[in-house]
Image (spheres, helix red, strand yellow):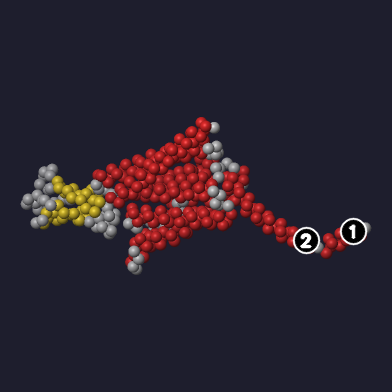
Amino acid sequence: MANASTKRGLFKWLAALGAVVLIAGIVMFLIASRQVNIAGYDTSVSATLSADGVTVTSSTPANPHAYISVSVPYTDGSDNTASCSAQADAQGTWTCDLDTAQPGATEIDATGTAPVLSLGLGVAAVVLICIGALLAIVGGIGMLLTGGQPLGLMSLLLIPVGVALDFALALVNNVLRLPLFLDSVGHILAGMLGGPVIGGITGWLGVMTNSSFQPAAVVWSFQGASIGVVVGLLAQAGMFKGPKRTVLSALIVIATSATLSSIISLVVYGGIDGYTISFLRVALTKIGWSMSSAVVATSVVIELIDKTISVGLPSLVIFGMSNRLLNLFVTGSKLRDMKTETVTSTATSDELANAAVDGYGSYDEKGEDDVATDK
């Protein structure tokens, strides 16, 4: 017993360490995302020569508030270069001035490059995120196994199934150009059946998979993992028992997702994150809304619709599963209670209705009883 308790304690510390490293990596990535022009590490720029030196301007807008480092080679055949740096404004435009220029130069070629420091910070952040996630996964699974909770093959299979479901529905959403996401149904299902560890792993991997075609979107993996963990904790607490608790749990998921979505959109992308919802935000800013208000309002409305669907579909799937199948999953007992409570409530209502009818009986039945009594 003591040995199992010691192992569980070690796994708990390992999971906590992984969570700290993961959060540190995410913070570093947020900083790097602000500094690096994610749209492309090379930016087309032009340079003009004046008496005060060289002014370099961008012909291609950078990401809002991105830091740009510009290298300007001389055209006299030498290897001499000059450089300057600048930060883009909220519209992505930027300029920088070189204090010195080649005497007598009549033409200067300029090319924009992303700063090495920011790129290195971004790579280090991704490495920390991977290490932290791995430690948290190992620690979480270890806590489950040493705690006597059955993990089972079915719970582990929820991870690839959930990731595939997230990818497929996100693809459908992108093809249809819907102002939704539909990329969280899989890890919400995994969290409801497998608990917070399985839900968190599935959410993180699901977003990372969807980010394979858009590297800048990797920052959303924090939101996916958080939603998976929150749903798993709610399932373990029995918060999906009956319609009322399920609705309350859905509201908690919606509030969590809308909050994280607003923060990431504003901090990393300046409100324009490249999704269809960005067009709605731009339209609101044109009629006088601030970008912060537009981001929060659109996030709440879209997440209300998106997460209602994302919680509703797994709930319907689970309600259609047999108790024998639910026994194979970590939170199966809590979900069995949900089904039993619903079925019992329905059965009780039917029994009361039947009892009311049987209490009065029918005319023929009473006549037979009276006859039997007389005899």
Instruction: Assess whether mark 1 and mark 2 are in contact (beta carbons under 8 angstroms).
Output: no
Q: Residue at x 56, y 49 (%)?
A: 238
Q: Residue at x 49, y 33 (%)?
A: 6
Q: Residue furthest bottom?
A: 287
The residue that label 1 is drawn on is: 373
Q: Quadrant of the N terminus?
A: top right
User: Badge 2 local density, few (<14 within 10 Å), some, or many (20+)?
Assistant: few
| Camera-nearest residue between 206 and 228 | 228
User: Badge 1 local density, few (<14 within 10 Å), some, or many (20+)?
Assistant: few
Looking at the rendering, which quadrant does residue 345 occupy?
bottom right
Q: Earlier in the sequence, mark 2 or mark 1?
A: 2
Q: Is residue 351 visible?
A: yes
Q: Is residue 164 visible?
A: no
Q: Quadrant of the C terminus?
A: bottom right
Residue 350, percent from left and from top: 70, 58
* Type of amino acid at the residue the image marks with label 1: Thr
With 101 as the anchor, is 170 left or right in this view?
A: right
With 155 as the anchor, is 68 left or right in this view?
A: left
Residue 352, percent from left and from top: 71, 59
| Camera-nearest residue between 371 and 319 | 371
Q: Residue at x 57, y 41 (%)?
A: 328
Is 225 above or below relative to 179?
Answer: above
Residue 311, percent from left and from top: 51, 53
| Camera-nearest residue between 286 and 295 | 295
- Label number found at residue 359: 2
